[in-house]
Image (spheres, helix red, strand yellow):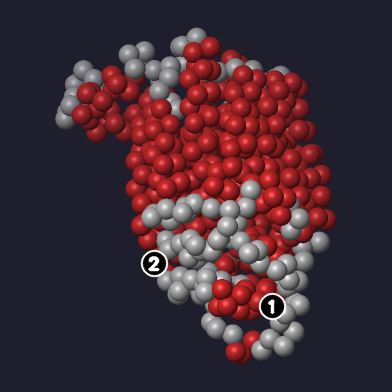
Amino acid sequence: MSQPKTPPTASILGYQPQLARRAYTAGEWPIHAWGIGSAALYLMYEQFYLIFNIHTTVFKVNVALVGAILALPRLVDGILDPILGHWSDNMRSRWGRRRPFLLIAAIVGAIMVSAMFMMSPEWPQWIKATLLALVAITLFTATGTYDMAHTALGYELSEDYSDRSRIQSIKGVYWSLFCIFGGYVIWIAGSLPKIGDFLFGDPSHPRLGFWTALRPWLLNGDGTSNEVIGFRVISLFAALMMLVTMVFPLLYAKERYVKINRQHVNLWKALKATLRCRPFVIILLIQFANGAGTLSRNLFFYIGVYSVCFGDKEEYSRIMSGDIALVSFFLCLIVWPLTKPLTRLIGKRASFILGAALNLINVAGLPFVATPGHVRLWFWYNVIFMPISMVIAAPAAGIMPDICDLDELKHGERREGLFTAVQSFMSKMQMSINMLLTGGFLAWTGFDASLGAHQRPEAIARMRMLGFTPLIIVSALAFVISCFMPITAKMMAQVRAELDARHAAAGTAAKS
């Protein structure tokens, strides 16, 4: 029998907060174990996003072709996301709803990550494109599946309005820790073979023999450049770390709502229900606006390398990716303990709006700081905004579990997987379009990889125009939309009280 569609305040007008049970929050170790699992997700995403920058500049794959290839996996995975999310929400297995998806996705992702750079720049375009397309489709499907299962598992770690924000901040610490690796990856790729030769000797005078034995396999017999060797070694390391970090949420993060969905609701009905949830629709609209801005951000690498750093790819990567990631990690450590009190102080709605406003101010100043020869100015500009942005955005990070509670109150089901999958579907459809357009836009600017550091002035001017102007416009749109977010602490206290009463009556309350 389906649950009554009771408005959130209808049956709790006499609710006394002091009589309510204490909201459940998992222990610190399960929360941190779940946070560690985000590293596997980061490594999958990071390797995928390296494709556009690295395969166009290092492996010399045509930019328009790469854009078309990278649009395809997002379309395939975007279609699969709602199906897999709905399947996960309704799965009944001895391992729970999420763990089977975590395990299979991580293994497949690790294999694809290690295969991604095993090609030669000298291969014909059609062979490189075919390999890249097969790997990209499989990797991104695994990434989306892992993301859905891991995120949905995290929503179950707490019922507390403020603790939900703190849990997302803990995840942010581990994510930012691995961002340091990702930020320096291009610099590491160029330096790794030199370090190997120093430690183990060059092929003609080996000291320990290890590098000499490994080198022919990495070179694939084609005399590949040091940079390519570096990426091959890094991809193997990334695959190993994915498998290691995936084990932590698999073994230690507790699932609490395994049996709460008593009857199977068809996918189309469930999808319509998620899209009738007003706060969730607002999240999707802001995601759409930010996703449109990603089209501009995709050009930042090329603006930074060819306009700001005069073609020095390693300098741009080291400063604007590596150094930024290092600062971000230490700031995450500072903000993490403050997240719960900040949520109580300013609330998620206010932080949601203030975060969008701060982002608009930030992007509006980019054309004036990302100027030729001033990469450090761009760096410090980001550093100044970063702590304020983190402090304001931290409380808003825990808003999606509240949306899942609202949905359960209205429909009587837990749909963390489907909500996550719908977000992912919308994001990936848009990213597919963005990747397709990025390749076309980059070709339209006149970018020519064969020119190396000496790109034409008109090409750089077009890159800057497309990189900054649309981003400012869509950031302003996101700020306006954010003002309509209705979720407050008072609303969620009422929702939680109603759900507690319903679970107790139905005997479905998960034990703490």
**Which residue lies under the disc numbered 1?**
494
Where residue 163 appears, as percent x and y from the top left, is 55, 71
Per the image, label 2 sits on a secondary structure element best described as: helix
Which residue, as the protein is rendered here, is positioned at the far left? 208
Q: Residues within 10 Å of mark 2 (few under 14, many from 20)?
A: few
Which residue, as the protein is rendered here, is positioned at the far top? 124
Instruction: Describe residue 384's horizontal placement relative to residue 337 as left or right.
Output: right
Residue lying at 53% horizontally and 17% vertically, measured from the top left: 129
Q: Earlier in the sequence, mark 2 or mark 1?
A: 2
Per the image, label 1 sits on a secondary structure element best described as: helix
**Which residue lies under the disc numbered 2?**
29
Q: Quadrant of residue 222?
A: top left
Residue lying at 48% horizontally and 65% vertically, measured from the top left: 256
The residue type indicated by label 1 comes to Gln
Q: Quadrant of residue 310?
A: top right
Residue lying at 70% horizontally and 20% vertically, measured from the top left: 443
Q: Nearer the viewer, residue 127 or 5?
A: 5
Instruction: Describe residue 236's horizontal placement relative to residue 64 as left or right.
Output: left
For the residues labelled 2 and 1, say whether their Cβ atoms are less than 8 Å apart.
no
Q: Quadrant of the C terminus?
A: bottom left
